Amino acid sequence: MAGRATEAGRATGADTGVVRPDPAGAGLTTGALARRLGVSPTTLRSWDRRYGIGPAVRGEGRHRRWTPQDVAVLEAMCRLTSAGVPPAEAARTARSGSEVPEAVVAPDMTLPEAGRARSHAGGTLPLGDVRQECRGLARAAVRLDAPAVEQQLASAIRDHGLIVAWQEVMVPTLHAVGRKWASSGDRYVEVEHLLSWHVSSALRRHTRPLSAQATGPAPGPMLLACVPGEQHSLPLEALNAGLCERGLPTRMFGGAVPAEALSAAVTRIGPAAVVLWAQTRSAASVPLAQHIAGAQWGVRGARARTAVMLGGPGWLGRSGKGMLRPTGLRDALDQLSGLYAESPPGEPQ
């Protein structure tokens, strides 16, 4: 019996993590297909029982064997349910072989009309709809379905705007995937990496090209940097995209900027503000923030200083007198926009 189980493992690639049909051509087992699609075997059995999405071939002892045609139907089912289509309707569409891509990208499948209207007006997405979008995005990420992840992220930004898409779709999904990874003994790390990469890509695609700074007096750009030892730059990428969307100049330095390099950059470009991101308390250095806030440049008698904004949970409970402390992405954008508009060049801050 043990030998037979080992042979079955080799046939489905269970011993290597690679999913492939068995040598006899009978198709994939339910477990192997579940790993491939990123769903549980119980879900596959439930879909078979409730909606008739089952394998065409059943082996001895009624063991399921999924053929390539069965797999194609299941992949269509997963894409449709991830896009918010009710399972019964998704099953009918998948079984009929109707064109799936058009259905998946249709905006009507992500939000009801009222929800879309509120989103375009700059409001908050209804809680149920946000959860549905997060579930769809997480499922696509678990399946390592990069095209679906990319498509859903682009749709979220297009339909709801950058701020809502970041705060209510991207961040909750990233947190959910992170919790899944942390609670499963280092499994799903590839899912977190794929999702983070595509979130970063979506934010960069949304970032408007930087135009040459206008001639004449003007405040310096916004300098965005993670503190030394901090690699979590996605929140800064969202902020950078939002500032560029408002037409404000930025200099994005990204993760783990050495203190000396950060200090040198401040004196070289004379930024209107420096945003320091710290995800963890151990990385948040108050002396560094104070040093940046005290940096000066310009001719003697007309020295200028930069405003410092502290972003991220690492700064919670840390003193930062005189420094900006935003409550979220929208608040950070509003504070920096106001600061840029009200700061004449060369005026000490």
Image (spheres, rainbow, N blue to C red):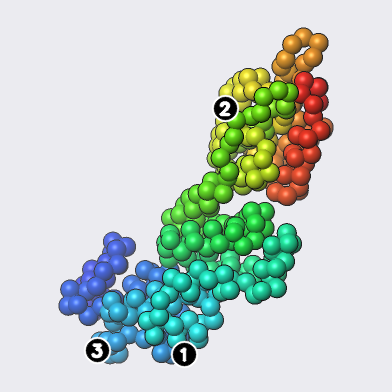
Mark sitting earlier along the chain (2/3): 3
In the picture of the structure, the residue carrying the numbered disc 3 is: 60
Name the spot of residue 167 as percent of width and height, x first.
66, 56
Q: Which mark is residue 258?
A: 2
Tell me the quarter of the picture where residue 190 sits.
bottom left
Name the amino acid, label 3.
Glu
Give the spatial CA distance, label 2 vs label 3: 63 Å
Q: Residue at x 50, y 68 (%)?
A: 105
Asked whether the beta carbons under mark 2 and mark 1 sit within 8 Å of each other, the answer is no
Single out the mark in the foreground, 2 or 3: 2
Q: Residues within 10 Å of mark 2 (few under 14, many from 20)?
A: few
Q: Residue at x 72, y 38 (%)?
A: 310
Asked if residue 135 lies left or right of residue 223, the reply is left
Q: Residue at x 17, y 77 (%)?
A: 24
Q: Residues within 10 Å of mark 3 (few under 14, many from 20)?
A: few
Name the amino acid, label 2.
Pro
Q: Residue at x 62, y 72 (%)?
A: 111
Tag 2 secondary structure: loop
Mark sitting earlier along the chain (1/3): 1
Asked if residue 163 lies left or right of residue 143, the reply is right
In the picture of the structure, the residue carrying the numbered disc 1 is: 50
* Camera-nearest residue between 340 and 53: 340
**Eyeballing the image, is 276 above or below 20?**
above
